[in-house]
Image (cartoon, coloured by chain):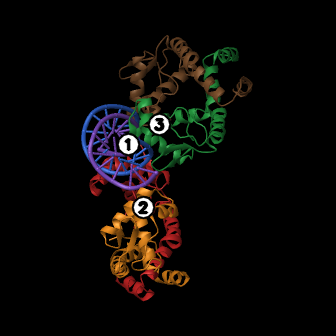
Chain colours: A green, B brown, C red, D orange, E purple, F blue
Amino acid sequence: MISSNEKTIFGKVAYLICEEILKCNYAADDRIPGVRDLAATYEINYNTVIRAMEVLQREEIVYQKRGIGYFVAADAKERLLDGQRKEFLQKTLPEVLRQARLLGIGLDAISEAWQETQ
Amino acid sequence: MISSNEKTIFGKVAYLICEEILKCNYAADDRIPGVRDLAATYEINYNTVIRAMEVLQREEIVYQKRGIGYFVAADAKERLLDGQRKEFLQKTLPEVLRQARLLGIGLDAISEAWQETQ
Amino acid sequence: MISSNEKTIFGKVAYLICEEILKCNYAADDRIPGVRDLAATYEINYNTVIRAMEVLQREEIVYQKRGIGYFVAADAKERLLDGQRKEFLQKTLPEVLRQARLLGIGLDAISEAWQETQ
Amino acid sequence: MISSNEKTIFGKVAYLICEEILKCNYAADDRIPGVRDLAATYEINYNTVIRAMEVLQREEIVYQKRGIGYFVAADAKERLLDGQRKEFLQKTLPEVLRQARLLGIGLDAISEAWQETQ
DNA sequence: GTGGTCTAGACCACC
DNA sequence: GTGGTCTAGACCACA
C-alpha cells in the first residue's frame, strides 16, 4: 500500500503519481512522463524517481515497456481507490477525528471546512 | 510547532507527550516521568527520548530542573491547544478533506465516522 | 524468490547471503556483518549492499534492528531450502539436463562429475 | 564463447540461434531467417537482433552476404559442440551439482530427472 | 557505531 | 531517445 504520508521522497513521488491516476490525469494504459521529466517536474534527482517507479511497479500500478517508458496498469485506478479508501476510512479518518475531539473541534467546524474545500 | 505526523521517532515521542498534556494526564508544573521510564514505555533508546525533550524544551512546553526531571510549563496546555488547533484547521483538516473528495468519500461518511469515534 | 543467476550485483549479493544462511554460516537470529563490512568483503559499493538487504528484508529472510544491524529470520533457512529446492528441481535441473542432451553428454558423465564435486 | 545464461537479450538471442544450429534446424551454409523475421519471432526490437548477429559473426558462427542475409558457417556446429561441451563440463555442471549438494539434492534425484527429460 | 536516503554522474542495454 | 545499475560522497536518524 502506498499511503499519503510516505516518509521518503521517492515514497511521496509514488503517492503523487497515484493521485494523478486517481484524478484521471493519467488514464489506463497512458504513458507516464519519462523519469527524467518527472525528476525535473518535482525538482528531485533522477534516481529518486526510478525508486518511486520500482515501488509502483511492485504494486502493479504501472508496467514498463523496455526502452519506451512506464504505463498505467489497466485496473490501477480501481485498485488504488479500493485500497486507499479502506486505508482512509480505517486509519486516517478515525485518527484525525480523534485528534479533532482532543482539540475541542466539533463536527460543525469540520462541516464548515468541508463546504470550503474545493 | 510539534505536529502529529512528525517523521522522526523523537518527533513522534514529543507529540505523544503533547497529547498527554492535552489530555491532562500531565498537568501544569507536574513532573513528567523520567527519561528512562519513557524510553521503556515507548520502547526506544534513551537518547531518543532526550532528543524529544530538547524539542519540547525549545518550544517551552516543558522546563527542566537539573537532577530532578522535566516539568510541564504553566501555560503549556493553552499554547498547545492554540497552536495545534490552528495547524489542524489550516493544514491537516483541509488536506484530509481534499483526500476524501479524491476518494469519493462524502460528508455523510465522515459524520458517520464521527459518531463512532470515542 | 531469490535465485542463483540474479542479473544485478545487488541480486547476486542477496543470493550469496542466502547461500551463507543455507551453509549455516549465518544461523537463525545471528547478526549479519554490517553493510559497510559486506561492501568491503564483496568489493562493491555500500549502497549496493543496502539494495541487497532491502530485497532480503522484503522476502523476510532477514529482519532489522534499528541502529544495530540485520539479523537472520528464524525460519529463513527452512523457507530458503523449500523455495530454492522447488526452483532447482522444476527449472534449473531440467534446463541443464536438456542442455546436456543437446550437447551429447550422458548421465555417466554427470555421475562422474558428481563424484568429483566436493 | 556464447553460453547459456547470457545476461543481455541480444546474448540470449545469440544463444538461441546457436541451439538451433546444434539441433540441426539450421545446417551448414543454410540461410538464417531474416533479421526482421527473427525480431518478430522473439518479439524484440530489430536492432537487438542485429547485435546478436554481430556477436555470432565475431565468433565466426555465421557469415554475412550483404544484401542477402546471414548464413551458418561450415564448421559452426562442430566448433559450438566443442566449445559449449567444454564450458558445460567445466563450469555449468560443477556449479549446478554444487548447488544441488547445498540443497540436499542427491544423485538419485538427478538421475530420476534425467529419465523424465525428453 | 549502526542503517538509510538523497544527490550526482558515468555507463549500459534496449527501442 | 528510453529505463536501469553502479559508484561516490554528503548528510541524517537511531542506539
Q: Is residue D20 above or below residue B18?
A: below
Image coordinates of residue A104 in percent, x first then y, are 63, 15
Residue under label 1: C67
Q: Is residue D81 above or below residue C11?
A: below
Q: Is residue A113 above or below residue D112?
A: above
Considering every residue shown, the one lying at the far bottom of the view is C108
Residue in the picture at 33% in, 68% down: D57
Chain to which mark 3 belongs: B
Chain to which mark 1 belongs: C
Helix, strand or loop at label 3? It is: helix
Q: Is residue B61 above or below residue D92?
A: above
Residue F7 versus residue C98: which sits nearer the camera?
Answer: C98
Chain to which mark 2 belongs: D
Residue under label 2: D49
Image coordinates of residue B22 in percent, x first then y, are 56, 19
Residue under label 3: B40
The answer to whether residue B35 shows anywhere in this view is yes
Identified by mark 3, the residue type is Ala
Image coordinates of residue B52 in percent, x first then y, are 42, 26
Identified by mark 2, the residue type is Val
Residue F13 found in image quarter: top left
For the residues labelled 2 and 1, the Cα–Cα distance comes to 49 Å
10 Å crowding of disc 3: few (<14), some (14-19), many (20+): few
* Residue B110 appears left or right of C110: right
For the residues labelled 2 and 3, the Cα–Cα distance comes to 63 Å
